[in-house]
Amino acid sequence: MMNWVIYIVFGLLVQPQVNPKKTIDALNQMPYEQKVAKAALLDKKFLENAQSAHKIGYTLGEAESYSNLSLIYYTQGKYALDVQYSLKAIALFDKLHEYEKLASAYGELGYRMKRRDMKSAQYYMQKGKRIAEDRKFTQPLLGIYNNYGVLKEMQQSLDSALYYYQKGLELKESIHDSLGLPYSLNNIAGVHLLRGEFARAKPLFERALDIRARRKDQAGIMESYSCFGDFYLMQNQPKPAIVWYQKALEKAQELGYIDFIQKSHKAISECYEILGNSALALKHHQAYSQFKDSLVNTQTNDKIAELEVRFQTNEKEKEIVQHKNELLEKNIEVKNARYQMAGLGLVALFVSLLGFLFYRQQKLKIRQQQQEFELKSAIAQIETQNQLQEQRLDISRDLHDNIGAQLTFIISSVDNLKYAFDIQNPKLSSKLNNISAFTQSTIVELRDTIWAMNSNDLTFEDLRVRMMNFIEKAQSAQEQTQIIFEIDSKLDALVLSSVLGMNVYRTMQEAVNNAIKYAHARQIQIQIKKTSAGFEMKIIDDGQGFDLDEVVRGNGLHNMQKRIEQIGGTFSLDTQVGNGTQISLSIHL
């Protein structure tokens, strides 16, 4: 009897030990949807989690807690705290060499800073992208490609944005990422909206909402509601837009998502303004202003800047310490070598020292004068380039704001004429269609011109995206013609001047148009290969060809040759009747 009592008492006193790391990890691994949905309540939990991890020396758990805490504060609209804990997490991931988590943390920080500091946002996003691509990490790239596309879209680079959205979508589909897939679908649809391609946008929005509804992803459903509001507002249908924005606002208020509360109020205010309901427009605009002031106040921005400077300073100090250690090691090696040679060269060194010092002094003086002259020349050149760049930006802005708006007005006016009047005359209807098509083509040409004017230098990646976009449109317009595009991957590292890149692009565009329009080609091959001096491009078609001796070169062929020769390249044309045409360009860099 006594033994039985002792056994029970001992069992009550000795409780099973819980592994503290598992408790910390369990909170850190909470699904993303739950973290966003319960953001208003989780800040204290993750802060306590980080403190517990720090006490037991569990640095990885501490870093992940800080990363989660930054997401919670971002959702709450506390942006200074978001940046503070993001940078803490990044420092710990870097210290632990957890490069996959480090890439994700950089990408998330870049995305969250997009509306406050685009320059810093790009810096952090590119840093995360570089780490993930160099080390072939799939998981971080799921978010980074999509979010990098958002930054490009905010900078009006729609072709680049669509390129990265498509890369993110392909990656997510390959691993069946049902959480991230709707974000890519909505972003691609958003680009179609900006281009006025509403029929292509709607099924993508519907697919994204369907996936989120099946997952019961409340934060995602909120974003999809807002996307449908944008869909109707951009078609000038404010009433259905209000319904969707109101649903998004209710979800955002339920989740405590400040950024979406602000966005929804602003959008609803714009809708009521279109409807002429000034009272409700004012009400929602006042609500938007209230949240806007809380999002971008001077104190918050100053705090974020202070945190960034502190972080960058720490990074620089690490580099300086590392550099000093390397210099110290080199100095030790040099000293040892000097000691070994000292006995043998002491007398010769003393005799030649005076002559060497005099020669060195004269040489340094000449070099200093030369450097001063080069510096003055460089400063003058930079000032000239800056003035030219400002003029180019002013011209491109005027083209976009004035000519672009006027061309868009022409298209809208033609469309209104077609739908407002029952036009029975086929010639008049055809003429209106021709005017609309020509104006749309002019807008595309205008975009290309503005794109080139806004860039001093272009990467080959930018040029490739432009070419692929043009080929895709040409293929869809002429389905019976097959266009094969091959490009050497070694060219990605090349940087081209905007003039060179634009002339190569225009030449390719003219050659493909000629092959389709005049040669009636069934297949067109575009090959771009790297050479020792630069690169070469060939456009080969199987069209009807022509006799060089009998055909007078028109403006198209003449312009292509002139463009290539203007940038110091060589242009050649090889064609025979019935045997197609080959155009070859050789560009020297």
Image (spheres, rainbow, N blue to C red):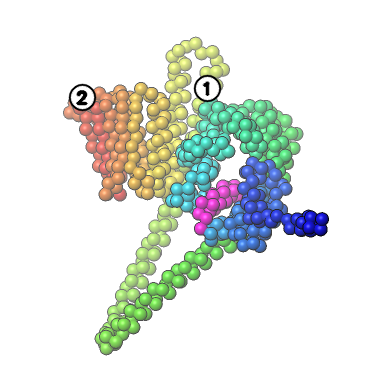
- Which of the two marks, 2 or 1, is nearer to us in this view? 2
Look at label 2 and name its amino acid. Val
Q: What element carries label 2?
A: loop
The quadrant where residue 364 appears: bottom left
Q: Eyeballing the image, is 6 above or below 499?
A: below
Q: Which residue is painted at 31% across and 40% down in the image?
A: 528
Query: Percent position (x, y) of residue 226?
Result: 63, 34
Looking at this view, name the residue that lies furthest to the top: 424
Quick one: 84 or 191, which is closer to the camera?
84
Give the residues drawn in magenta, as a range.
97-121
Quadrant the N terminus occupies: bottom right
- The residue pinned by badge 2 equals 577
**Mark 1 residue crowding within 10 angstroms, few (<14) / some (14–19) / many (20+):** some
Q: What element carries label 1?
A: helix
Look at label 1 and name its amino acid. Asp
Q: Is the magenta stretch mostly helix, strand or loop?
A: helix
Q: Which residue is painted at 21% across and 32% down in the image?
A: 574
The reply to whether discs 2 and 1 touch (Cβ–Cβ < 8 Å) is no
The quadrant where residue 345 appears: bottom left
- The residue pinned by badge 1 equals 415
User: Is residue 267 shown to the viewer in this render?
Assistant: no
Quick one: 20 or 148, which is closer to the camera?
20
For the residues labelled 2 and 1, the Cα–Cα distance comes to 43 Å
Apparent side of residue 387 relative to residue 501 in the rendered image (left or right): right
